[in-house]
Image (spheres, rainbow, N blue to C red):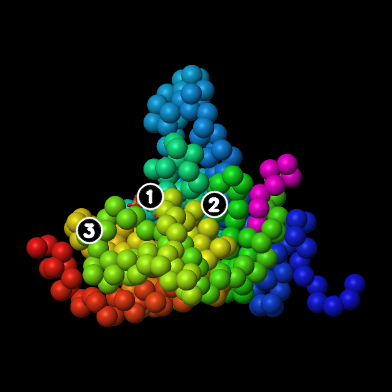
Amino acid sequence: MEGKSVPPKGTWTIERHIMLQEKAHPDASGDFTQLLMDIALAGKIISREVNKAGLVEILGLTGETNVQGEQVQKLDDYANHTILSILDRSGRVCILGTEENSEPIRILPPYEAGNYAVSLDPLDGSSNIDANVSVGTIFSIHRKVSKGPRGEDEDLLQKGNKQLAAGYIIYGSSTMMVYSTGNGVHGFTLDPSVGEFLLSHPDIRIPKRGSVYSVNEGNSLFWSKGITEYIHYLKQRDEQSGRPYSSRYIGSLVSDFHRNLLHGGIFLYPADFKDPNKTQGKLRLLYEAAPMAFIVEHAGGYASDGRQNILDIEATELHQRTPLIVGSYEDVKECEKFIAEYDNDKLDVKEKKK
Ligand code: AHM
Ligand code: MG
């Protein structure tokens, strides 16, 4: 064959793809590759279970006892347990942080601690699952930085720009794994007949500008002025810029993000001042915002908290929240301009409380 070889779609497994990426790092031990493979395996197992969620009439609702007299586990518990039991004894991970566990999970003797810290949302959007809405697993990997033999909080609490890899698995009409190790963003579709994730979306690039916005507009009365003005602007007609934008909100981050990654657009979960828990938004920095920011940036997009790059935010605790504005580069930058113009720190909070 002549010319540059492009990995062929439909026949390249994720394993082969990850191994090829590893070859670019001759000093790599293979542990990192194996860690990504472990996450892919967890994705396959969770996918199988999520696909059974529609069978509640037959298998029983989660939290209930099914016809065989077995307790049916909640799917988010199942997903969490599945990933943890694959990773915690692998010898590749030193500490894990998940949405489901209030404290970080350190890998302690007799299990070996590895060189990586992993943050996870095992099943994001799971409140939608009984309505057959696509949900997903989100992951983020950092290198161990602490000096001792075991993992420490500081290994998890690193900035997004220190991630070695990030990605998600979306359980939709088909199951897909999308990941980046900083060398492009690649998507693989699970072919259940062969049980493999096969390359379907090599080198994904997000359009520089989209024509879709995704936000929970039910919260709009509690937004800052900057966000309110920005969304209002997107709705105004302007033939040249393609406005008005269309609104598309599923309420499942992985699904909303995935659609915008492929077709362009902007997703926002801003601070809202109705709920004291949401003055920093709803989404979590380490296992929701930062991995999506890493993916989008390596696909040519951008993620911001309104004022700064999500990847530059200092992480101080596992379940830290952040406003998240993510998607097409020009759209997110434009939104930042509205925030810079209209929102003066806490002034907008007071205004909203009147
Ligand atoms: P979860 O981690 O409890 O599932 O919540 C995160 C989900 C995201 O998937 C989604 O973007 C967001 O919550 C939707 O929230 P809302 O219902 O407030 O719009
Ligand atoms: Mg979540």
- The answer to whether residue 266 of the structure is visible from this angle is no
Some atom of ligand 2 lies within 8 Å of the CB belonging to the residue at label 1 = no
**In this view of the protein, which residue sits in the foreground, 260 or 88?**
260
Question: For this view, does 341 lie left or right of residue 117?
Answer: left
Q: Which element carries disc 3, helix, strand or loop?
A: helix
Q: CA distance from mark 2 to mark 3?
A: 31 Å
The quadrant where residue 30 appears:
bottom right
Residue 354 placed where, x, y %?
9, 63
Q: Amino acid at mark 3?
A: Leu
Residue at the image position 28 percent from the left and 66 percent from the top:
228
The quadrant where residue 73 appears:
top left
Q: Which residue is mark 2?
A: 170
The quadrant where residue 213 appears:
bottom left
* Callout 2 touching callout 3 (CB < 8 Å): no
Question: For this view, does 209 lie left or right of residue 16?
Answer: left
**In this view of the protein, which residue sits in the foreground, 148 or 12?**
12
Q: Which residues are magenta?
A: 188-194
Q: Which element carries disc 2, helix, strand or loop?
A: strand
- The answer to whether residue 177 of the structure is visible from this angle is yes
Q: Quadrant of the N terminus?
A: bottom right
Some atom of ligand 1 lies within 8 Å of the CB belonging to the residue at label 3 = no
Q: Which element carries disc 1, helix, strand or loop?
A: loop
Q: Which residue is mark 3?
A: 221
Q: Which residue is mark 1?
A: 100
Residue 117 placed where, x, y %?
47, 65
Q: CA distance from mark 1 to mark 3?
A: 30 Å
Q: Nearer the viewer, mark 2 or mark 1?
A: 2
Give the residue at the far right of this rendering. 1
Give the mark nearer the N terminus: 2 vs 3: 2
Give the mark nearer the N terminus: 1 vs 3: 1
